[in-house]
Amino acid sequence: MNSNMGDGNGKLWYGPQYHQIYLKEGDIIDPSNKWVVVDEHPDSMNDGCFFTNMTTSSPSYVDLPGTMHNNACGYGFADGHSEIKKWNHEMKSNITYSRSWAPKGKGAKADWLWHQERSSAPRK
């Protein structure tokens, strides 16, 4: 689940002053553009939250999105629709049970910004 949805788990390492935290459905300004659940890559499954670093525009995944759909990932949005995001670069596809991975290649930044934009909004 998107760590920006709800309150709990002491999840905001970089603080809520940088982005919105959605405590209730009415807090989400554009629910068609904010994801709630995601297919997480097996190598980063360690808790119930999917953390997204909202303080950088450089690809910097805390948890890894999945690649289980031919280098694509399923997202469920707050308005109830779902999407399959086809990655523009090669995401980590093999399962190694290791968290060491950094996105590389053409399209990595565009993919990161797509994910980040749909995770939260800047703090108002």
Image: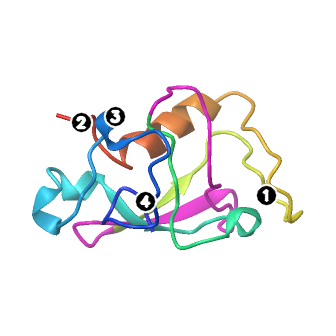
Residue ID at (50%, 28%): 56
Q: CA distance from mark 1 to mark 2?
A: 33 Å
Residue indicated by mark 2: 123
Residue displayed at 70% across by 62% down: 44
Give the secondary structure at mark 1.
loop
Q: Position of residue 22 (x, y in %)?
A: 24, 58
Q: Residues within 10 Å of mark 1 (few under 14, many from 20)?
A: some
Instruction: Report how far apart the C-alphas of labels 1 and 4 lie in the structure.
Output: 23 Å
Q: Marks 3 and 4, how far apart in space?
A: 14 Å
What colour scheme does the image use?
A: rainbow
* Left or right of 102 in this view: 64: left
Amino acid type, residue under disc 4 in the picture: Ser
Residue under label 3, please give it.
18
Q: In what quadrant of the picture does the N terminus appear?
A: bottom left
Question: Mark 4 Cα within 10 Å, few/some/many (few <14, many 20+)?
Answer: many
* Cβ atoms under marks 2 and 3 closer than 8 Å: yes
In this rendering, which labeled residue sits more in front, label 1 or label 2?
2
- Mark 3 is on which residue type? Tyr
* Label disc, if present, on residue 93 of the rendered structure: 1
Residue 40 located within the stretch drawn in magenta: no
Above or below, 47 against 44 in this view is below
* SS for callout 2: loop
Q: CA distance from mark 2 to mark 4?
A: 15 Å
Magenta region, residue range: 55-81
Which residue is found at the position 51% from the left and 41% from the top?
53
